Image: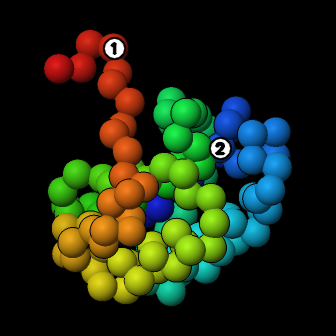
Amino acid sequence: MRLTVCRDCCCGTTRKHPELDHDEQLRRLREIAERHGARVTVSDCLDVCAQSNVVVVQRPGGGKPVWLGFVLGEAVLGDLARWLAAGGPGRAPLPDTLELHRISPPVREGSP
C-alpha cells in the first residue's frame, strides 16, 4: 500500500496553512504508514490545490486510488490510521468521516 502526499505550491506550506506543522504531519503519516505495512511517497503538485493538503491512498491491485483532501488535523490522521488498520482501499469501506475528505482526482487534458 502507498500513501502519496502532495508537498508543493499549496500542500505542505505555511503560506496556505500557517496553523499546521507540516513536518509533523508528514512524520505522523510515515508513522501510520509504517504501522500498516505501507510506504509514503512525497509528490510535487497533484493539481488539486483548492483541496490542499492532499493524500492519495493506493493498494496495488486494490482498485482505484482514494484521493483525500483537506487533510489538516490530527482527527483525519486518526481516521486514516483506523481505516488502514481495517484493510484500507479495496479491503475496507471508506469510513463516513473520511468520505467527507474524499475528492476527485484532477482531469488530465486528453482524458476521457
Q: Is residue 85 above or below residue 20?
A: below
In front: 103, or 90? Answer: 103
Mark seen at residue 11: 2
Lower sequence index among marks 2 and 1: 2
Label 2 environment density (alpha carbons within 10 Å; few <14, some 14–19, many ≥20)? many
Image quadrant holding the N terminus, namely: bottom left
Q: Is residue 26 above or below residue 10?
A: below
Q: Say what amino acid the circle numbered 2 marks.
A: Cys
In front: 97, or 71? Answer: 97
Q: Say what amino acid the circle numbered 1 marks.
A: Glu
Pick out the residue farthest to the top. Answer: 110
Give the SS element for disc 2: loop
Q: Is residue 10 left or right of residue 54?
A: right
Residue at horizontal 28 percent and vertical 80 percent from the top: 87
The reply to whether residue 30 is visible in this rendering is no
The picture places residue 95, in percent across and down from the top left corner, at 30, 72
Label 1 environment density (alpha carbons within 10 Å; few <14, some 14–19, many ≥20)? few
